Amino acid sequence: MKRTPPAAPALGALTPLIALDVVVLDTETTGLDIRKDRIVQIGAVRMVGREILANETFDVIVDPQMPIPEVAQRIHGLKDADVAGSRTIADVLPELAAFIGGAVVVGHSIHFDLAILRHEAERTGVAWTEPKALDVALMVAGLDPALVDTSLDNLALNLGVDIKGRHTALGDARATADVYVGLQPRLIAKGIRTLAEAEHLCRKPAGLIARQEEAGWFERPKDKRDFAHAVLRSGSRKAIDSYLYRNRLGDVMSSPPISLPQTAPLSEAARLMTDRGIGCLIIERDGLDPGILTERDVLHALAASGSDAPELSVSTLMTAPVISAPADTFLYRALGLMARRNLRYLGVTDGGGRVTGVFTLRTLLRERALATLTVGDEIAAATRPRDLAKVQSALPALASGLLDDGQDARNVCAIIAAEGKAMTARAAELAEAELVAAGAGPAPADYALLVLGSGGRGESMLAADQDNALVIDDSYTGDLDSLDDWFTRFAARVNEILDRAGIPLCSGGVMARNRHWRRRLGEWEDQLAEWAAHPSPQALLNVDIFYDFTPAHVSGSAGARLAEALRIHAMETARASLTMLRALGETAASHGPPLGLFGRIRKDDQGRVDLKAGGLLPIVAGARTIALRQGITDLTTPGRLLAAAKAAHRSEADAEILANIHGFLIRLILTQQIADLQAGIPPSNRIEINRLAHRDHDELREALGRIELMVHMLRDILQGI
């Protein structure tokens, strides 16, 4: 045993497998009856993602304090003499718990091992916390329901794993670790990238789970109530909490408060505020509760008294007593009090009612900003894909907290898009550094790496995939079709890094690694002309995604100018092509809302409805078409709608209605995506109708019925082309 780390914080359901802290565990026992048999050996090895930390192991012989049956001896080779004098399980369990810490335990038929550990802990009175767990047998069975033999030997054979030390606990743990490593590419290929998704996969093999239940693997000692469901569901649901509901005044207050006696002149108060960079002072009053003097009080005094103001006593200007709340008050309640009393500053009291701190809206904004900057710093400091994967996995929780805080869903999407753009930029920096380290040198020409589609518009949600392109300076004479070309290698590596970080490859191939999306500026201009002259269905799909581009990373002095030149040319080309604009308008108008007879919302077999196809798409595509017609450079859908209505002297009320519908649909989809991710279900644009509140259901039906306003706006603004 090489290391016993302190307990780590519990891993969230959305932690990506590529960044998952894992302990692969195996036990050898006196038999297979979890209620009566005992442990004779425990072996474990630590992993991070797909990296096996071979030197960080746990390998312990245990005295079971009972004879080892001959049949068990033949399997693991341990006899009574081999374990005599070894430590007991009561001594070993605390060390094992410390070694596991907050990691996820992975094993083959791991719920047997956990069950016998659970019963050993109960028998000996040792505290034991059930860890999160993944069973490689259940995962393989979930991937391939037709597979009959899920034994460790067969899994190892299928994955090309050589088992050494079979039926020793550490040997089997190492073999299982190798199987888990080999299994991960198959998981990723099936879209299973997070802990929650892997847990969801483990719940699919109903037959295998039933056999494990019959063996009692999911029973708690003295508690046989549906523990299987609880264990297998562990981590799939997590309370969605926000900053304001997690933190209390004492967590964010400024303490100790800066104070002055009530006899001090205003000049001294103003000087102290300036020196300390604060907006208020606590004013001490002999025998009385303190008061408060704010920067607004100073300004009012100057306005009212002019040159005489500095000599005024703070006691004549302060507000007393200072309105306060206890330090253990949740922030959401404190903000409610401040809103009701129209306060910018709130005193914070200790258990004795003494003012020991001050809470301000400025403090809150700073604390929230620092929490967000932690994500930004992680992106900037990332040195490998799994560092970026941690950022990607944090976005659902960030989105959930912001929505709970009352943020407009479109603002939340803008934040998600900004993080995606930053991750793309960091992937480009890492790819550049790798090429330099490999001897390929720096970029041979200036370029801009573009983010397309919803990421370019700043309207990204949580069903992420890659949409990017590369524009290269015309001076470059290299062969962009060659696999050895610098830009070919660069683009392929960028897409690979993002894919491993949890932003999957685009199923439609809209990525810089594909030659079609990797061009010189002149080539892009020719392509734009081709799309405009021959707006085929495929060309229109390409226009839809390309025309929302924004640069994520630029190289060289001309990189930014390349992106701007391409944007100007793209706008001019589109505005001059009446044929393409008409085709775009017709396509946008052809997407009808999912409404049936009497305006009922049409659901699929799973009780869901796709709000992108019949809701967002006509609004987003219609707004883009109108913006191209009017020469509007705003990339956001609401901005395009409102600017187009003004430019064409059309109804701004209709534009605002459509913009509000756009935001409402995004909120419903984003909320569903958060819930699905927590449950291990791949996020999509399909929402579960029955989970909607009655008010949202009625509003959705009304919103879908008014999307025809987009058709009317298109017809009005594109009239005559």
Image (spheres, rainbow, N blue to C red):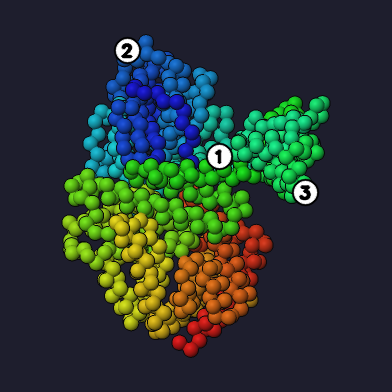
Question: On the rendered image, what quadrant is the N terminus found in?
Answer: top left
In the rendered image, the residue lying farthest to the right is 287
Residue drawn 32% across and 78% down? 529
Q: Which residue is mark 2?
A: 81
Q: Is there CB contact under 8 Å for labels 3 and 2?
A: no
Mark 3 vs mark 1: give the one in front: 3
Q: Residues within 10 Å of mark 1 (few under 14, many from 20)?
A: few
Residue drawn 41% across and 17% down? 64
Residue type at tag 2: Ala
- The spot of residue 415 in percent (x, y) is 50, 54
Camera sees residue 334? no
Q: Nearer the viewer, residue 392 or 123?
A: 392
Q: In the rendered structure, which disc, 3 or 1, sits on the residue that comes first in sequence?
A: 1
Q: Nearer the viewer, residue 328 or 300?
A: 300
- Residue 226's tag is 1
Give the quarter of the image for residue 600. bottom right
Distance of mark 1 from mark 2, alpha carbons? 40 Å
- Under circle 3, the secondary element is helix
- The spot of residue 530 in percent (x, y) is 30, 78
Q: Is residue 532 above or below residue 395?
A: below
Residue type at tag 3: Ala
Distance of mark 3 from mark 2, alpha carbons? 95 Å
Q: Is residue 420 left or right of residue 81?
A: right
- Residue 652's tag is none
Distance of mark 3 from mark 1, alpha carbons? 73 Å
Q: Is residue 706 above or below residue 113?
A: below
In the rendered image, the residue lying farthest to the bottom is 720
